[in-house]
Amino acid sequence: PAEKIAVIHNGVDSNRFFPDPAARARIRHELGLSDEEFCIGCVANLNPVKDHPTLLKAVAEFSQECGDWRLLLVGTGPQRPALERLVAEHPNARDRVVFLGLSDRVPALLNAMDVWVLPSLAEGISNALLEAMATGLPVVATDVGGNPEVVVDGQSGLLFPAGDRGKLASHLSTLRARVDLRVQLGKQALRRVREEFSI
């Protein structure tokens, strides 16, 4: 019976993941990112279910109208060689996609980003998604699994159909052009995580 079931969602540690302007400045300097450069990020294992190819194809499409961008991929896994080959096939992306591998500096790296993307084909309640939102980032995630439980589309982030690189590219273009929307979504993401998904 429904009344016998309760759901306890994952929670995020706001003592580790929070907006940190000093970390943003430090990491962007280390990576050679200018203040104006639009930094897209993804923290996820490089496994097929995370569908990084859709993200890479979307940024290749997006890059045709925006040359001032960078994509940071944090994580490792069996798909890395195939993903590196995919990047090599797109001249616009070769020098702008950075594979950072495993990192113990995820909270700082998140702060360096302007938008965070989760292109998964399937998800539960993603800790990485919660961590990005707790950092005050506007997030773009697939409309699958637990993602719509975390992200209120158009309020605390943007959703797109799994595998839809065109819609993802459109979201990225909109967020690149509208700093006000990035700020609004980031603030709402931070508030939602603190109110609904705290430890």
Image (cartoon, rainbow, N blue to C red):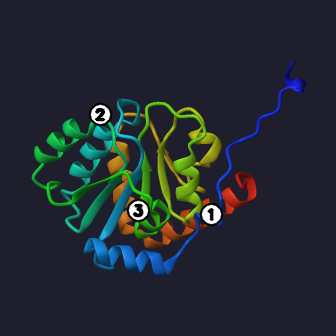
Q: Residue at x 40, y 36 (%)?
A: 50
How packed mark 3 is, by other alpha carbons closer than 10 Å (few <14, some 14-19, many 20 or more), is many
Residue 183 spot, x, y in % from top left: 52, 70
* Residue type, mark 1 in image: Leu
Q: Is residue 36 in view from this perspective?
A: no
Whole-Å distance between the Cαs marked 1 and 3? 17 Å
Instruction: Indicate left or right for 102 with 59 as reference.
Output: right
The reply to whether callout 1 and callout 3 are in contact (CB within 8 Å) is: no
* Residue type, mark 2 in image: Pro
Q: Point out the frontmost of discs 3 and 2.
A: 2
Q: Mark 3 points at which residue?
A: 175
Residue 188 spot, x, y in % from top left: 62, 63
Decide which of tag 1 and tag 2 comes sooner along the chain.
Answer: 2
Whole-Å distance between the Cαs marked 3 and 2? 31 Å
Q: Point out the frontmost of discs 1 and 2.
A: 2
Q: Mark 1 points at which residue?
A: 190
Residue 149 spot, x, y in % from top left: 64, 41
Q: Which residue is drawn at 35% across and 30% down?
A: 48
